Amino acid sequence: MKRGVYMSEMIKNDREFVLPGDEIINSMDYLPGRSCFRDGNSIYSKRLGLVSVRGRVISVISLSGVYVPRGGDMVIGKVEDIHSAGWVVNIESVGEAFLPLSGVREFIDTTKTDLSKFYAVGDVIYAKINSANPHSIHLSMQDPRARKFRSGRIVNMSPAKVPRLIGKEGSMINVIKDKSGCRINVGQNGLVWFEGEKEDLVVDAINLVEKDAARDGLTNKVSLMLNGK
């Protein structure tokens, strides 16, 4: 090897399983992203999870409470790339999702239309999972609930606790909507969008659900907490 010429060595590939402390790549050409750290020339995993290689950024998707996509779920995701056949969307899951041209309501002539006019990189959308398997996740915007968010706030919570936030037949989320005066969309992937009069109340309610998810009478406790603010 010539002096001054550095070779990159990929130890773990994209979507490969890693343990905390596992070396992922020996290279100064890549940057450590989420759940990774650099030591010397190498990037290592901080967590149990799956390797994610996006450009020159190495990340690890934690498998602790990670969202496992299922057909029919409504999720919130961010557009990360645009291909000729559709959009790549990050839904905070074990793999990226894809919104194909067939998944939008409008007919799009790709020879005449820039796809970014519909969904640009960085746009946040509320979409339905049309199909999901270990190798691919396809989204659809044809569900009446689907939309692109143009304003509002988004917070994260554990996907495992989303059912508690929604409540039986929507009891919990309806209480939060009534008390806060906010419009709220809950993604099964643990992302919650909201916008309205008292947005801080929504944050307080989500924090309480995260903290006391296993407690009986949680809906009443959240209601009392919101009444006092």
Image: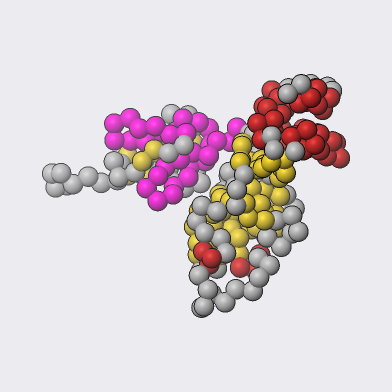
Residue at the image position 71 percent from the left and 62 percent from the top: 142
Residue 64 visible in the picture: yes
Magenta-tinted stretch: 35-64
Tell whether 18 sits left or right of 187.
Answer: left
179 shown above or below 113: above
Q: Main secondary structure of the magenta part?
A: strand
The residue sitting at the right extreme is 169
151 shown above or below 214: below
The residue sitting at the front extreme is 197
Residue at the image position 53 percent from the left and 65 percent from the top: 117
Percent coordinates x, y for residue 67 in the rendering: 64, 41
User: Is 58 a magenta residue?
Assistant: yes
Image quarter of the C terminus: top right
Count the marks: how many? Answer: 0
User: Is 40 a magenta residue?
Assistant: yes
Percent coordinates x, y for residue 182 in the rendering: 72, 40
